[in-house]
Amino acid sequence: MHAIANDYSQEQLDAWAPKNHSLERIEKNICYVAHIDNTIVGFADLTHKGEIDRLYVNKDFQGKRIGSKLLQKLEEKAKKLNFQEITTESSIMAKPFFEAHNFSVIKKNEKEHRNMIFITFSMQKKIY
């Protein structure tokens, strides 16, 4: 949590990840879940427009290529759906991960979410 806390205030963290979530958005997406010994350690989802909506790995399991494997599954699905590219709106913290996986920054954004301003990056990757 320290790396996240360095990039975002507590108010921003609370606004971005409220305690009460709706599952409606997740249910409409193509979702993959990573688990180890019946414990969910990460998940990723792709919209039907080719946008990575979320890619999350539990902090205790980061650095074990779980995020890379989830991203690979999303890319494989995007290819099967004949997408020419996939996109994401990356956080400051996730930007280096996506860049390491050949995503390019299209633009830097200031996004308002629940009355808080966040810096994000619109990114894309061509699918071949």
Image (tube, grey):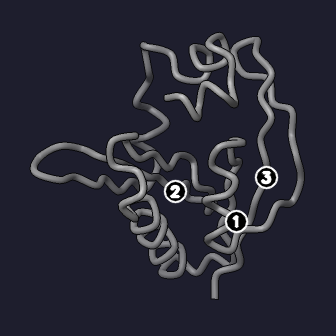
Q: Residue furthest bottom?
A: 128
| Mark pair 3, 2: CA separation | 15 Å
Task: Locate residue 101: give its quadrant.
Answer: bottom right
The mark that comes first in sequence, 3 or 2, is 2
Residue at 28%, 55% in the rendered image = 34
| For residue 113, side relative to residue 50 (left or right) | right
Tag 2's secondary structure? strand
Which amino acid does the dot numbered 3 rest on?
Ser
Q: Amino acid at mark 2?
A: Leu
Label 1 or label 3, whichever lies nearer to me, is 1
Residue linked to disc 2: 46
Question: Which residue is rendered at x = 48% and y = 81% of the image?
Answer: 80
Density class for disc 1 (Cα within 10 Å; few <14, some 14-19, many ≥20) is some
Find the distance from the CA under tag 2 to the CA under tag 1.
Answer: 18 Å
| Callout 3: SS | strand
What element does badge 1 sit on? helix
Pinpoint residue 102: horizontal percent, then vertical percent.
68, 74
Q: Residue at x 42, y 57 (%)?
A: 63
Say which amino acid is labelled 1. Answer: Glu
Q: Residues within 10 Å of mark 2 (few under 14, many from 20)?
A: many
- Residue sitting nearer the eye, 62 or 108: 62
Which residue in the protein does label 1 denote? Answer: 99
Q: Earlier in the sequence, mark 1 or mark 3?
A: 1
Task: Give the left or right position of residue 102, taking residue 34 as reference.
Answer: right
Mark earlier in primary sequence (2, 1): 2
What residue does disc 3 label? 122
Q: Residues within 10 Å of mark 3 (few under 14, many from 20)?
A: some
Q: CA distance from mark 1 to mark 3?
A: 12 Å
- The quarter of the displayed image where residue 69 is located: bottom left
Q: Residue at x 48, y 65 (%)?
A: 71
> Of 66 and 125, which appears nearest the observer?
66
> Residue 58, image x and y in percent?
37, 41
